Image: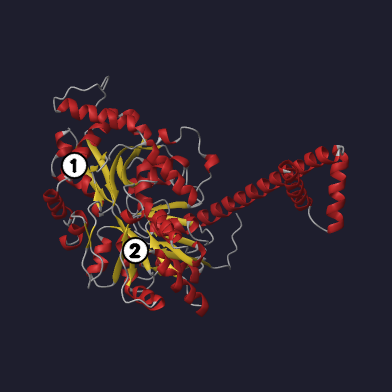
Amino acid sequence: MTVVVHEKLKVLLIDEDHAKVQGFKDALCDTRYVIAHHSGKHASLLKTVDKLQPDLIVIDIESPSRDMLESLSTLSHFNPKPIVMFSTEQETEVITQSVQSGVSAYIVGDADPERVTPILDAAVAQFAQFNSLKTELIETKNQLDAKEVIDKAKRLLIKSKGLSEEQAFHSMRKMAMDSGQKMEDVAKTVVSLLDSFHKGARSV
Amino acid sequence: MSQLKRTINLGFIPLTDSAPLIVAKENGYFEKWGLDVELLKQNSWATLRDKLHAGLLDAAQMLAPMPIASALGLGTIKTSVITPLVLSLNGNAITLSESLHQEILKANQITSITLPMAAYLLQNVVNLRKQKGAPKLMFANVFPFSCHYYQLLDWLASGQINRDDVDIVVVPPVNMVSHLESGEIDGFCVGGPWNAKAVRSGIGITALTSFDIWQDSPEKVLGLLSSFQQQHPDTVLAICAALQEACQWLETVPNRFEAARLLSKVKYLDASIDVIAPSLLGSCLTHIERSPRSIPSYNQFSANRNGTINQPELVRGEWLIKQMHQAGQLNMEDIPDDFIASVFRPDIYQNMRCLLNENAGIKSKCTGT
């Protein structure tokens, strides 16, 4: 992992306990992380997240605000953020294994600078990796969808126009080149035209 | 018979409808069934769920859609959670801030809102705000996978309010009233005692209850890991039997008031009877200057007019899946056949009923428990 040392990362710390907050601030004072604090009790967390655009969110696992955070990706259109949860109870550590992937690393106990920084680093790196995997997955899925619609258009052309597979493919490629569209978009037009044509023909 | 696991960690969120768990503990029903149960108060649904998945909690009170979400891996790592018992029906309400109340009166040129409030009264407010370029109305609910969220969506849809014309966020129940008071949200859908609390504080109007939106849908259920049930089938039956007895005890009005007293304790809801008792007694506080509405089914724990309610019927589960689908949280094609039968478990419920009958000396058709 390459760390760009000059780049400061904004950390939003959600916790109601002010002593703990100070501990974190002290632990991170000479690192690439800058801490903004949110108590969760009164001011709206969503507004804070929107305004601050933190690079990382750190939250006490026992904070009621966790449900709000949980909804960021599900209900709202906020970009997902790496989230680190901390707990002061040793036993809660086992939760790490069951928490959603890409969401959490874990700190147990006091904010020891030697320990906190690598955990935050790991969370940021892990999240970036998770996100790139997710993007890759979406791209692969889109490519598969495109292949599917092109195949369907080819089949319809073969059936309705009596073309060979090669002729069908070439005619679509020519349409794409002439109109400056993607093959996929041409295929979509072909499918919707021929589909409605067939349906219309049947209902006559 | 499998070995009974005597000590049980049971998670709950402090709400009026956690009554069955608290009554089972306080009235000694868990003890009677050989269990030493510790009730562990949780601050968020997400953490309650994660602790259940990790085995830190043996069982927990859950929002009815949560076991389904866990089993499908929605918002969490896929984990086989089951529910053998429905703990309550209804219990939520939608409360609007006093300033939105006034805005509705003005926008519709009326002097009073007829309750339960029809959502179309929001249309003029939404449109006026759009014209003025004012912020959208912001409504809060308690969790992405909650009946509260789906009820809010249903109510807005019933008034032809476009989903994109409002903002919907999650706010923890304990912070709902302060968020409404500060104007950060314009309304919320939450369970008791928070609606009554907002009305008593004079900062809002309870527009309608969840019973006005959906009649008798499961609200809270008992959730536990499928693996826990396989390891400790008899313990699960004992937990269910104790909770079932508590639900039955909660059936009568005199007991309901006693329950309100238990719930108000610091270690449970830490709230006054003033705001806990009304919904338990079938009263929906509406506004500081108006009379309460009578909603006999506001909190249902054991029976309704159609019989008993605690069996986790498969049709109920399927219905919840449909709500999740309508909210855009899942694709129906991704749901395996017979999926709901792996989450909602009327078979375990039936075994528990047999145990209760046996215990009462009633002969029944039960076999092999």
Tag 1: amino acid:
Ala
Tag 2: amino acid:
Lys
Q: In which quarter of the image is residue A166?
A: top right
Crowding around mark 1 (Cα neighbors within 10 Å: few <14, some 14 to 19, many 20+) is: many
Question: Where residue B138 sits: x, y (%)?
Answer: 43, 68
Q: What colouring method underlies this structural image?
A: secondary structure
Q: In which quarter of the image is residue B345?
A: top left
Q: If the image is split into quadrants, where does the N terminus of chain B sit?
A: top left
Disc 1 secondary structure class: helix
Crowding around mark 2 (Cα neighbors within 10 Å: few <14, some 14 to 19, many 20+) is: some
B148 or A63: nearer the viewer? B148
Chain ID, mark 1: B
Query: Closer to the camera: disc 1 or disc 2?
Result: 1
Q: In this view, does A28 lie to the left or right of A90?
A: right
Question: Where residue B166 sits: x, y (%)?
Answer: 47, 66
Question: Where residue B55 sits: x, y (%)?
Answer: 34, 40
Q: In this view, does B178 lie above or below B83?
A: below
Q: Measure the C-alpha gap from mark 1 to mark 2.
A: 40 Å
Q: Residue drawn 39% across and 38% down?
A: B315
Q: Is residue B110 left or right of residue A53?
A: left
Q: Is residue B292 left or right of residue A170?
A: left
| Residue of label 2 | A20
A190 or B255: nearer the viewer? A190
| Residue of label 1 | B246
A22 or A105: nearer the viewer? A105
Question: Where residue A49 sits: x, y (%)?
Answer: 47, 67
